[in-house]
Image (cartoon, helix red, strand yellow):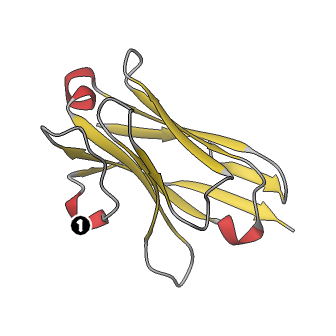
């Protein structure tokens, strides 16, 4: 139900935009989030957004560089990643949490659905 796009190889300082698409009714009732997992490390929170898109949260490590947004008309969330660093290298996962509240979630434990990851590699 979730499809992620946009990963790839980029040089440090460059930009990438990840997209995650979901089915219509499911998307509109879900808070969305991105998590990432680097080799040998645990999955970590990157960014999250509420159902309406009115509230967002970003991990301290990406604040000021990454921006999460959503287009409910297109059933898609976008993670704009600028000023990429080698430590941003990871597999990025899109996730959704069904909710009746207009809030976002930063814990992977509450996410109900996960997409297949997309690899982001930042070379130094």
Residue at image point 80% right, 52% down:
10
Residue at image point 27% right, 30% down:
27
Residue 108 rendering spot, x and y as whole percentages: 30, 64
In the image, residue 84 sits, relative to residue 31, either above or below, namely below
Q: Can you see residue 77?
A: yes
Residue at image point 15% right, 42% down:
99
Residue 61 rendering spot, x and y as whole percentages: 61, 67
Label 1: few (<14), some or many (≥20) within 10 Å?
few
In the image, residue 82 sits, relative to residue 37, either above or below, namely above
In the image, residue 63 sits, relative to residue 5, either above or below, namely below
Residue sticking out furthest to the front: 54
User: Observer-nearest residue: 59 or 12?
Assistant: 59
- Element marked by disc 1: helix
Residue sticking out furthest to the left: 100
Residue 1 rendering spot, x and y as whole percentages: 28, 37
Left or right: where 124 falls relative to 54: right
Residue at image point 37% right, 21% down:
72
Residue 30 rendering spot, x and y as whole percentages: 24, 37
Q: Can you see residue 116?
A: no
Left or right: where 31 falls relative to 67: left
Left or right: where 87 falls relative to 2: right
What residue is disc 1 on? 109
On the rendered image, what quadrant is the C terminus found in? bottom right
Residue sticking out furthest to the top: 73
């Amino acid at each position: 139900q979730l499809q992620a796009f946009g990963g790839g190889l980029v040089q440090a300082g460059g930009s990438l935009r990840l997209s995650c698409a979901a089915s219509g009714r499911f998307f509109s009732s879900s808070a969305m989030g991105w998590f990432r997992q680097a080799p040998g490390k645990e999955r970590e929170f990157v960014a999250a957004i509420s159902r309406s898109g009115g509230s967002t949260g970003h991990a301290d490590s990406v604040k000021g560089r990454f921006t999460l947004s959503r287009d409910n008309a297109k059933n898609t969330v976008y993670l704009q990643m600028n000023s990429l660093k080698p430590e941003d290298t990871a597999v990025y996962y899109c996730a959704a949490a069904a909710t009746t509240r207009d809030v976002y979630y930063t814990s992977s434990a509450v996410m109900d659905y996960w997409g297949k990851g997309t690899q982001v590699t930042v070379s130094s």
